[in-house]
Image (cartoon, helix red, strand yellow):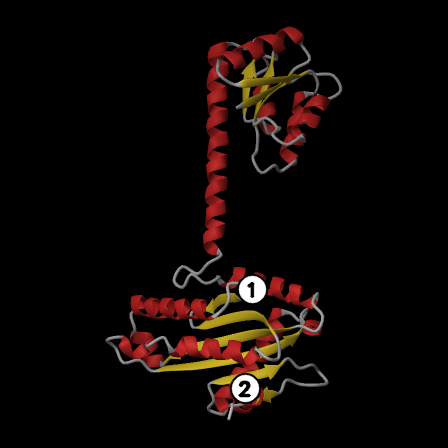
Amino acid sequence: MKVLIVDDAEIDTLLCQKIVESLGYTPITVSSAVEARELLNQDGAPDIIILDWMMPEMDGIDLCKIIRRSRLIIEPFVLIMTANSDRHAEAEALNAGADDFISKPVNRIDLEAKLKLGRRLIKNQLELLVANQRLKEKLKFDSVTGLMSRQAGLHAIVAALSRLSRQQDQEGLFIHCLIRFSSKQQHHLKHDLLDKIYFELASNLTEALRQSDVMVRFKDDEFLFFAESDSDSHQIVLSRVETAIQENNLNSYDTALEVATLVAGLIVTSEQALTSVPVLLQNTEELLSQLTATHKTIGLSYLGSNKNPAKILDFARFRKTNFPHKS
């Protein structure tokens, strides 16, 4: 581990350097706070800093304050050293952001203890940073289904829409899927059974769609999907989602299940791709309501505008038109 020693006194610097080196650390020495600032702005800067209090141009206290204002990912361990025997000196150093205080002339026993403390604090920061990163990665995915979680998924959909907006004459398909059990069953079903159902459903959907498609568990019983598509394949993608849900054999469980499934597909052109996700959801929710009112389970619509409101396509006719039977 590298230790930066900042002191304008050559003899004190040499003494400190020898002790640091004998303890197994790599000492780096500079004679001014200005030099130290330049070094600390570089990649691979030392994690432990020993600052002399009294130096020309800028003293150790001021440099310590600057370091703390920098908001580095890993906060360096700052040790202030001084010959000042005033009992208030240590408090002033700690108030400036120093982690510890040591008196000059430095002795090996005291410095060894301070450096061990610094190394332990740096190690704790690194472990916490790794743990937080792992937690962030874990939170990107739903713990039950393995699909993207709500927040991460919405960000992924925004990114996919942004890509679509840069592709001329392309279209995307935004799918909103509801899988709801009867209110009576929802209340009595055990969580582990619901988790198993949703896990198997997610597995079917993952196999049915492409790896590049965005798949999100939006709520417990709601799923969102976004796929780059075209006029010839919208129905295919929507049918895959429908088939994946139907293949989830709900009758194979010990409890007879009553489930209502609704699938709403919204066609988004590249010119409409900068439409916000809440607006897309508003459109799919309206489509889902219309499907419920007309006792249908699947619907496909173009994203409308104020002048041209969304229009539901007849799914059966859409299928027949785009995929005529061969005689």
Under tag 1, what secondary structure? helix
Task: State the residue in front, 76 or 237.
Answer: 237
Tell which residue pokes out farthest to the top in this image.
Answer: 11
Marking on residue 237: none
Residue name at image x 46 percent, y 28 percent: 120
Decide: is 167 above or below 55. Answer: below
Q: CA distance from mark 1 to mark 2?
A: 32 Å
Q: Are marks 1 and 2 in contact (CB under 8 Å)?
A: no
Bin the neighbour count of mark 2 within 10 Å (Cα to Cα): few under 14, some 14-19, many 20 and up.
few
Residue 140, x across and y down, in percent = 49, 56
Q: Is residue 147 left or right of residue 323?
A: left
Q: Residue furthest left?
A: 254
Q: Which percent across, then down, holds residue 5?
A: 61, 18
Q: Which one is in front in this view, the residue at disc 1 or the one at disc 2?
A: 2
Residue drawn at the location 57% of the way across and 77% of the way down: 233
Name the residue type under label 1.
Leu
Identify the element where label 2 is drawn: loop
Q: Which residue is mark 2?
A: 323
